[in-house]
Image: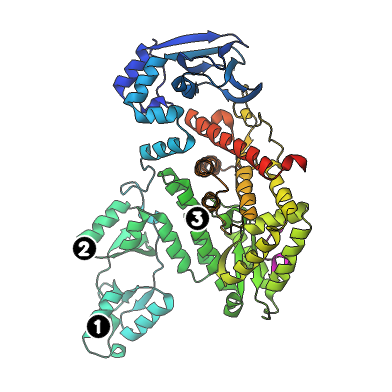
Amino acid sequence: MPNAFSFAHSPFDCLEPEEQRMVRDHVDIGYYAPGQVLLERGAAPTHLFVVVKGHVAQEDQGDTVVTYGPEDCFDGRSLVAGRASSRFVATEEVITYELARATVLELIARNATFGALLFSDLGHKLSVLAQRQHPRDLPSLSLSRVGDAFLRPVHEVPAALDVLSAVRRMHAERTASVLVRDDAATPPRRGIFSRTLLERAILSGRPLDQMPVGDWARFPVVEVRAGDSVGDAMALMLRHRIHRLVVVDGERTLGMLESLDLLSYVSNPSHLVALQIDNASSLDALADAAAQIDRVVSVLFRSGTRVGLVAHLVQQLNARLFLRAWQLIAPPELVANSCLFVMGSEGRGEQLLKTDQDNGLILRDGYAPPPDLADLCDRFSQALGRFGYPPCPGGIMLSQPLWRRSSSEWARQLQDWVWRPEGEALMHLAIFLDAHAVAGDAALLDAARAHLMTLATDHEGLQSRFAAAIDAFGHAGPSWWSRLLTPGAAPEPWHIKKEGLFPLVHGVRSLALAHRVTATATTDRIEALVALGALSPGEGEDLAEALQVLMALRLKAGLAEREQQRPISGTVAPDQLGSLDRDLLKDALGVVKRFQQMLRTRFHLGVL
């Protein structure tokens, strides 16, 4: 066997050196002319095929369901089962490596990961991959710089100021410490006064308004440069037994670095962004925090964090961001007598990189909103735009009158959408079903959702029309996802949301509506539908794992586009996918295809 066999691609990248030697000793090379059958349906496979050149089509009942290209392998499942369930045909000149069946079975017995990646179901594959993944790209103590970490604002007071006034300043600025400037010293010096030192001042028994804060401050303050490594900063804290460092850049003071923030930076950056949001006292400060959210997504995802957890963290951060922005813009009485909610992927907790705004407002019946309500809502939408969330092209924002109403007006609007289920009304229903409260009285949204469920679950015609959108993008045929590896130098980019995520998410949403499931997250809906018997446990697991695969591929493509300073398109280039990603994507799309077929039967879509 030639030594050119590549072990850099799945599933061969998990083999140990001795197992790699087995492959080299038992693999041959095959050649197939265009149109030649490599493996016939029902035949007993004798080899595992690895494509070196060309493309092979997998046919089922005359339709091409998958296309295999260079670095792809097939058909491990048939090899294990002892019988091919599909027909495999060369669509052009094909050269393959062919690994003997006995060797493959021995490798499976010796290496469980190889076996799982070769022929297991999607859930098992992802489980094995999660165990193999090692954190990477987390901020390194030696490579990360102090200036990249979260720095708290510095507040400075003169040493002659009394302790009570200094504490009042700390309370007003929502900070645990202040810098103390002693200009009377030679040379002038700076120190720090914190809550810990305040305790000592109180225990002294002297009146706080008669003691200079300089008497209790700790001098001198320990400084660190913004360009120093995070590891050096941590060493400084340990050496001086302190919890705060002043960060400087030349003569400028940039901020305060606290030990808790430093530890959070190297473990969970989302904590720092949440802290920054909660402490923001202006929209400018919130904009700075919002700019960090995409960095958190990138760091967590590339460190191996499961994409569902990343999405959940993003939902929590965005909810806090929207809440704090609304609190800074709207008067407290309006906040208390309304419910601000988000919809779409944001409402489901499945948004990763920033997308269009989808939000609305429910006002309590009997409450008279401020006369400038429209202006307040416009300011909120403009603030979100500044944070990186562009306006919704369809105007689904509380700055539009349709999406800010009283509870009774919302009830009438929902009824109108249900009883006239056409085009835009169906789209609005789908969006509203994903609504998630982020500020104000969540009970107002709960009541509106309960009213919608009562209307919709008694209307079978609506349910069928609603579910029919799973085929909205016109690729329901058996070959629509085989385009992933269509022969050619530049396959058409594939839209992950339209052709994969949307039919899965909307299909689950349709079942949730039919069974009166009030959960908004797709995974929560799947879990509830399995509990109700509307989905089998196996179907539920497959759908949940397929969702993870599609979300992860969409995020990976989006991060790559952002790094290249290109607009985020939501598409993936099939020819740029690695063999493992192609394998997972094929499995995920197979799950989506079967789910669509089940939904067509369940909702009688063929007769609409």
Residue to which mark 1 is pinned: 201
Tell me the CA gap for discs 3 and 2: 36 Å
Residue type of the residue flagged with mark 1: Ala
CA separation in Å, label 3 and label 1: 42 Å
Q: Residue 325 location in percent, x, y?
A: 56, 68
Q: Is residue 320 magenta?
A: no
- Which residue corresponds to mark 3? 314
Q: Main secondary structure of the magenta part?
A: loop
Secondary structure of residue under mark 3 = helix
Q: Earlier in the sequence, mark 3 or mark 1?
A: 1
| Relative to 120, residue 559 above or below | below
Instruction: Identify the residue shown where x is 53% and y is 14%.
Output: 43
* Residue lying at 36% horizontally and 40% vertically, measured from the top left: 134
Q: Nearer the viewer, mark 3 or mark 1?
A: 3
Q: Quadrant of residue 447?
A: bottom right
Of mark 2 and mark 1, the one earlier in the sequence is 1
Mark 3 or mark 2, which is nearer to you?
3
Q: Nearer the viewer, residue 472 or 327?
A: 472
Q: Amino acid at mark 3?
A: Val
Q: In this rendering, is residue 456 above or below 172?
A: above
Region of the chain picked out in magenta, as a range:
394-404
What label does residue 240 carry, if any? 2
Work out whether residue 555 or residue 461 is closer to the camera in this orientation and state it.
Answer: 461
Three-letter code for the amino acid on which mark 2 is drawn: His
Quarter of the picture holding the C terminus: top right
Magenta includes 395? yes
